[in-house]
């Protein structure tokens, strides 16, 4: 059997003055050679790893708190604590610590907390103890001055705390408090306020245990009602006894647990409401008070988890149809507070807490509660559901997939959540926003698990799109049956709520497009969702129209041809173009977002969408000249069409690529040598340096693609230069800029260029009728054939060869 006496939790104090749980293990004390002294060792109970190795330093101040805690500081701002499962184990380790330091185990602190100056240390050595004035009404002022003067000195604070403990001084002060209240002695009550406040700042656990005991805590709160800085006293005791009611929705049989709950509530009230806000210098003096509350909460949660009868009764009454509405509301509110209470726990404690709730059947209970008519009960159940989703979304996903095998879609837990989101009564849709965030967490593949046997992403998304997606999109489909949104007016709370709800749904659908693959693609295409969404582009609510545009932009951003074919087949750019034209010349978010979408198509060169936009919407967009986006799209389209109309050019490029990258390197070097060794006389004689296999090629067939390539290249360069010269660096162009891309002009330019450059044409440089002709037609043709053949041999010299051709 495991020795539970030595079972401990190790805690460290973080920068936010909160205790972090470092793990559970078993503590021992032994001599460690490396540290040269007796040390505390804690080994994890899970794997035996070393959680703590701390030498018991003779000068370190160790504190024993609440019979099961040992707290100390190892370095500046590094506090440690051991929380024992049993008091006997704590006492045993405490004796070891006191034995090393030569202290009596009956003390609760072994050393002074802070080093003093030599002068103070010498002064205090001459007075080993602190003598308190007799506890009398006439000496309250003297006692208050003594407490105030002791606070700046850690040694004096320690001696004052020991004196208060040993003489039972606090209870005597509380007796005088009753006397002062009976006599209405306001001056004495003000002195008692200062004294009790000073005792809090002593930061001593033993004193807190006395003040927070059942018989003393209300009198301590009474003393703190008489703040001298306030004109009237506060009524804290009246609030705690009359206003604040402890509702025991399920009877708690353990009296210790019940007393701990009362104590924690009252101490938390003292910290938050009664004590004044501590100054920067006083904040660290209340660290023990924070620790007291923290460990009390850990203890309460643990005691409730261990009480199986309590939790069983709780869930049984929650799901029992015979339970009246008022009782059920109290039960749900208790469970909500219980879950909220657990958020202060460390991760390991919180894991154990939620596992216990899961084993008790919290998710089936929530499903029953969410199906009820009481709005307040449903709201509390939604908050509980949010705690569960944030803790472990996989647990929730597993539950809803299992219940789908037994229940209809209408009563599935996740569909109930969607329905509550759609039917949120809050004018600001606060609940709907919360639920949308939870749904987003549930469908996020980033937090889904994958194992060797199954993939949670595949299974859950398949379930979600089959059983739940139709419920989520129902409001969207209902409001987009026509060409305009059916409920789209500026006025009316319900109409605005409808627009906000549709925006939330679109936000989740956009998330699905980005993170899901074929599930959302099949759903959008099969249900024609994008066409219905784009109906909202005509909405009078700009935020809703932008949500619709963002949804389409996310789809286009995927560059998926399945989506692109769907968009083109259904002409789904039409609502966007209409919205762009209706927006007019206004320079707003709608204008910028639409232009950005078309710019993305141009920059990414999405050929199918480019052709679709120009072929169907060019006439509507050709006059937009303050940006070059649409004219750039037109240019892309023209270049694409030219490549399609001249397949020989593509084959020519293929030939060049093949010769450039696929021919043997040594062959290339030999041909380059032959090229440079060939003199002009050989060129004039018409001899072409070609491989035997290439000599049979027809010169005219070779020249034709070269000539056409040069014609198109020149035309393209001239057009692009004209566009670039007109482009404004700011991204918006001069309204007077006009650039015609009409097919007639383009054809004329092409035909003129072709006619002027063809060999033998009247205007060509090598023709007999052109001015400056270098020679006869046959000589020119022979030279051109030779040069062109060399192009076939080596594509790397294409540019220099073409320049040579222009010079001939």
Image (spheres, helix red, strand yellow):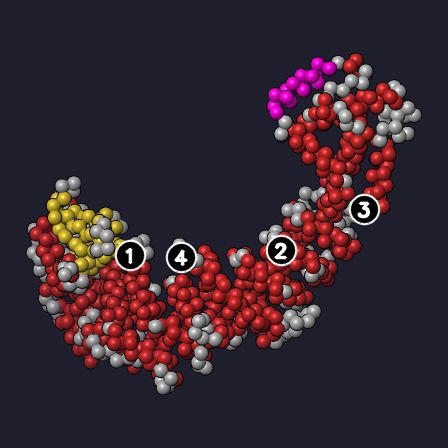
Which residue is identified by label 2?
562
207 left or right of 350?
left
| Eye-nearest disc, 2 or 4 | 4
Residue 65: % across, % down: 17, 61
Is the C-beta separation of discs 1 and 2 under 8 Å?
no
**Residue under the point 72% across and 51% down:** 611
Q: Earlier in the sequence, mark 3 or mark 1?
A: 1
**Residue under the point 52% across and 56% down:** 515
327 left or right of 511?
left
C-alpha span from label 4 to label 3: 62 Å
- SS for tag 3? loop
Is the C-beta separation of discs 2 and 4 under 8 Å?
no
Which residue is identified by label 3?
740
Which residue is identified by label 4?
453
Query: Which range of residues does the magenta coloring cover?
Result: 664-678
211 or 174, nearer to the observer: 211
Is the C-beta separation of discs 1 and 4 under 8 Å?
no
Looking at the rendered image, the quarter that the N terminus falls into is bottom left
């Amino acid at each position: 059997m495991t020795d539970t006496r030595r079972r401990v939790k190790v805690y460290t104090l973080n920068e936010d003055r909160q205790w972090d749980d470092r793990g559970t293990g078993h503590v021992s004390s032994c001599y460690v050679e490396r540290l040269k002294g007796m040390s505390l060792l804690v080994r994890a109970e899970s794997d035996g790893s070393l959680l703590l190795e701390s030498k018991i330093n003779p000068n370190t101040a160790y504190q024993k708190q609440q019979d099961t805690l040992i707290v100390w500081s190892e370095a500046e701002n590094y506090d440690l604590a051991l929380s024992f499962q049993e008091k006997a184990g704590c006492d045993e380790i405490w004796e070891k610590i006191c034995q090393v330091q030569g202290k009596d185990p009956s003390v609760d602190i072994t050393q002074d907390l802070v080093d003093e100056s030599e002068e103070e240390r010498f002064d205090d050595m001459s007075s080993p103890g602190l003598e308190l004035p007799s506890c009398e009404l006439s000496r309250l002022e003297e006692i208050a001055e003594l407490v105030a003067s002791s606070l700046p000195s850690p040694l004096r604070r320690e001696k004052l705390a020991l004196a208060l403990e040993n003489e039972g001084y606090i209870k005597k002060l509380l007796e005088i408090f009753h006397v002062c209240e009976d006599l209405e002695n306001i001056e004495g009550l003000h002195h008692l306020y200062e004294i009790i406040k000073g005792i809090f700042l002593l930061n001593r656990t033993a004193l807190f245990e006395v003040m927070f005991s059942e018989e003393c805590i209300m009198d301590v709160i009474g003393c703190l009602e008489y703040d001298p800085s306030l004109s009237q006293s506060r009524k804290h005791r009246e609030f705690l006894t009359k206003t604040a009611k402890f509702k025991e929705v399920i009877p708690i049989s353990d009296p210790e647990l019940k007393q701990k709950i009362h104590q924690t509530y009252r101490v938390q009230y003292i910290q938050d409401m009664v004590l004044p806000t501590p100054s920067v210098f006083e904040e660290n003096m209340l660290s023990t008070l924070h620790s007291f509350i923290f460990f009390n909460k850990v203890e309460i949660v643990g005691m409730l988890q261990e009480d199986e009868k309590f939790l069983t009764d709780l869930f049984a009454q929650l799901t029992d149809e015979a339970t009246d509405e008022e009782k059920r509301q109290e039960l749900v509110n208790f469970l909500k507070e219980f879950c909220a209470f657990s958020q202060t726990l460390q991760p390991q404690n919180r894991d154990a807490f939620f596992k216990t709730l899961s084993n008790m059947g919290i998710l089936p209970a929530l499903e029953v509660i969410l199906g009820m008519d009481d709005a307040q009960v449903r709201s509390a159940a939604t908050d509980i559901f949010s705690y569960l989703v944030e803790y472990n979304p996989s647990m929730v996903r597993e539950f809803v997939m299992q219940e789908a095998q037994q229940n209809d879609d209408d009563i599935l837990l996740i569909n109930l959540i969607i329905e509550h989101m759609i039917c949120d009564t809050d004018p600001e849709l606060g609940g709907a926003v919360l639920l949308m965030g939870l749904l987003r967490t549930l469908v996020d593949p980033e937090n889904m698990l994958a194992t060797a046997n199954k993939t949670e992403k595949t299974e859950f998304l398949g379930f979600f799109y089959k059983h739940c997606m139709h419920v989520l999109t129902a409001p969207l489909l209902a409001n987009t049956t026509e060409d305009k949104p059916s409920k789209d007016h500026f006025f009316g709370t319900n109409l605005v709520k409808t627009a906000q709800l549709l925006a939330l749904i679109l936000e989740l659908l956009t998330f699905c497009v980005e993170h899901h693959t074929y599930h959302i693609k099949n759903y959008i295409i099969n249900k024609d969702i994008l066409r219905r969404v784009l109906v909202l582009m005509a909405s009078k609510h700009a935020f809703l129209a932008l949500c619709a545009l963002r949804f389409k932009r996310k789809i286009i951003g995927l560059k998926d041809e399945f989506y692109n074919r769907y968009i083109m087949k259904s002409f789904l750019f039409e609502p966007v173009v209409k919205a762009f034209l209706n927006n007019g010349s206004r320079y707003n978010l709608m204008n910028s977002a639409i232009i950005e979408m078309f710019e993305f198509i141009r920059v990414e060169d999405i050929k199918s969408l480019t052709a679709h936009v120009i072929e169907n919407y060019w006439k509507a967009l050709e006059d937009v000249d303050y940006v070059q986006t649409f004219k750039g799209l037109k240019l892309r389209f023209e270049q694409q069409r030219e490549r399609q109309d001249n397949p020989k050019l593509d084959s020519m490029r293929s030939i060049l690529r093949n010769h450039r990258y696929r021919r043997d390197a040594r062959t290339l070097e030999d041909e380059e040598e032959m090229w440079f060794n060939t003199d002009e006389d050989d060129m004039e004689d018409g001899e072409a340096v070609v491989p035997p296999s290439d000599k049979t090629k027809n010169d005219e067939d070779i020249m034709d693609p070269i000539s056409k390539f040069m014609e198109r290249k020149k035309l393209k360069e001239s057009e692009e230069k004209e566009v670039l010269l007109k482009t404004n660096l700011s991204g918006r162009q001069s309204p007077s800029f006009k650039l015609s891309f009409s097919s007639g002009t383009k054809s004329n330019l092409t035909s003129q260029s072709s006619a002027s450059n063809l060999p033998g044409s009247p205007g060509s440089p090598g023709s007999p009728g052109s001015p400056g002709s270098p020679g006869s037609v046959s000589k020119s043709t022979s030279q051109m054939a030779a040069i062109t053949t060399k192009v076939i041999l080596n594509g790397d010299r294409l540019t220099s060869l073409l320049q040579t051709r222009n010079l001939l």
